[in-house]
Image (cartoon, helix red, strand yellow):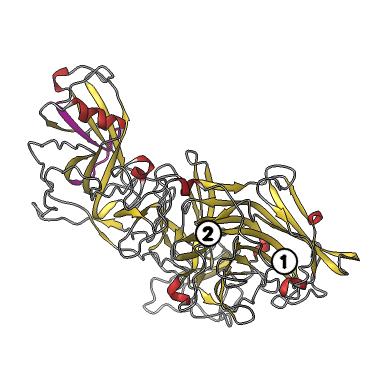
Amino acid sequence: AELYDSIQYSLNPWDVSLLDGLVSGEKRFYVDLLADAEAGTNIIIQLENKNAGSQSYPVGRHSRYEAIIPAGGSIDKWQTLAFKFLDRPDENETVVNQIVILFSPGSYANNVYMYDNVDVYGISAVSPSPTSSPIVSSLPTSVPTRTPTGSPVATTTASPSRTPTSVSASPTKAPSPDEEQSCSGTCPGTFPYGCAENLVNVVKYGCTSDGHCSYHETLEEPYPFAGFCTYKSLSPSPTFSPVAQTLPTGAPTRPPTGSPVATASPSRTPTNAYVCPSIRWSDEFDGNELDTTNKWSYQVGDGCPLCGWGNNELQWYQPDNVHVSNGELTIDAREESQPVGNGKQYTSGRIRTKDQADFKYGYFEARIRIPIGRGLWPAFWMLPTEELYGNWPQSGEIDIMENVGHEPGTNHGTIHYGDAWPNNQYSGGSVDLLEGVNFADGYHLFAVDKSEGLLIWYLDGVEFYRRTPSDISPKQWPFDEQFHFILNVAVGGQWPGNPDSTTEFPQTMYVDYVRVYDASPGQLVGPQTMESRERNVQYQVTVPDSGYEYEWQVPPGSTILSGQGASLIIVDFGSVSGDVVVQMSSSSCGEHRVLKIPVRIESGYSFESRVVDDTSTIATASGTYEVSLNPLPNDEGNPSENVVRYERNGAELYDSI
């Protein structure tokens, strides 16, 4: 019944240096929480001078700090919330002898909160000592829904050996921002510091083997990052829909931790903060010509003396087939009326970032609409800038997106490595769109996350393949070096075959952007196959709700039970396959992304014949039988115009038709 429900603790006056540290961000409040409040619910800690009495806000209110309950809520496990400085309502107030906690201020919510250990962490933390502790007697617990399955099933494919031309000797380039932030043995400063205070689920941090500060999210599967402002979510925690259940009064909580001791790396793990993914490099293709000064260069010809680029390709690459306009790059594959170059019948375009944009690690993504037709071979891929381990493919190749025209709904992700050609090795996975849907129908996000000892491929934000050094052992893992981008559309070759009478020219690959993020800008997790009419199925975007807006779509006949507008939804499915789509946008991060999972409904049965419908001939009926208009003609469960309307005969014990 209270709009601003509050809890007040009296304190001994706080030291000015402690207050200054909290306001500056050098120190932070942390609170352990277990609650049935929804994700996105805010909690305020307000520091006051109780001697200001009943004077109106903001008099006597020294400062306020806010935390947001993260995605999935805090129902099924304890969460440690980190509070950020919000404001200084009374700039003149210097005395603090009272702390006020406001759960969901400005609402008439009626939730239950269990909390413990309201602590301050920093270089010289001072912990206030509450004089009392409220007892909470009941708390909603949870019944799990179907949890995300994570990675879609990847099928092993036999991508043919793409043989590039020889890569020139070692180039010279300026150090990247990551390389300028180095360390020795331990990272400088205390945790949290700098942008690192916004890292999610950090349990370990230190130096990588090449001297960069890095942050590890799990001890079991460390994921290192160079730089101070990156984070990576390795495995999203499953979340659950609440069902009320009473816990006994005095149910045990976690034991108190006491006063914190100042340390360079406290074990606190903030769970609700989020750093906007930082774009280290991009080409948005906003101009009217390709940027060949700072980003790209053309590759011209047919690859000779490695003619046909080592794959018996038929095209001649030339700059005239590459254009930039209307915010996108286009590469045209054309059939020429007169031979071009070395007598080639087809022309196309191929560009690369070698020696201008080379990257060791990052999340590499392009938004592309590919062409269609037998004999076409569009690709977004990477080669090493320096061949440190030998000629192709000993120094590696990473194919982020490859499609062959006779498989218009299939995307391939592949690595090439191992022994020198022709005894080379490769390993790859593929992912399919729904039946009847082609990649040429619209734009898709093709990405690979490249980190130390790990490559993960994504289509539209959904993981479909990953490789580590152990997967290709005992062969050399050459992928922890600088690589550059290549965009091209090949025509013909050993893998796609040659164009035939069904292939229409010209064909165009459209590229909206190419970006390099410090960290993943969001992944979509959830099952891709299920039985007809499956219930309570969960899908989630692995970034917190705070700062993002979400709009979800589900296949025809399916229903979103909860979560529209949030990062997690619960779905009841019908019997029709289709995409689960989420549009996520953030004005603060300047991001708008469309992620999608193709969901296949496997009923186990397929239609054979119809026995009865509204046109069937009826012999007898006990009740009133008539053909009637469908009262719900727009219901996708049965959109028929006519249906049978039957009113049962109440005088018949065994009414029959």
Q: Residue at x 77, y 71 (%)?
A: 305
Residue 630 drawn at (x, y percent): 56, 62
Q: Residue at x 29, y 45 (%)?
A: 191
Position of 443 with respect to 517 (left or right) is: right
Indicate the quadrant where residue 498 lies: bottom right
Q: Which residue is mark 2?
A: 596
Indicate the quadrant where residue 619 lies: bottom right
Which three-letter amino acid code belongs to the residue tagged 1?
A: Ile
Q: Which residue is mark 1?
A: 372
Residue 571 drawn at (x, y percent): 42, 60
Q: Is 346 in front, or is 591?
A: 346
Q: Residue at x 48, y 65 (%)?
A: 455
Q: Is 186 in front, or is 125?
A: 186
User: Does the segment drawn in magenta span residue 392?
Assistant: no
Mark 1 to mark 2: distance in Å? Answer: 21 Å
Q: Earlier in the sequence, mark 1 or mark 2?
A: 1
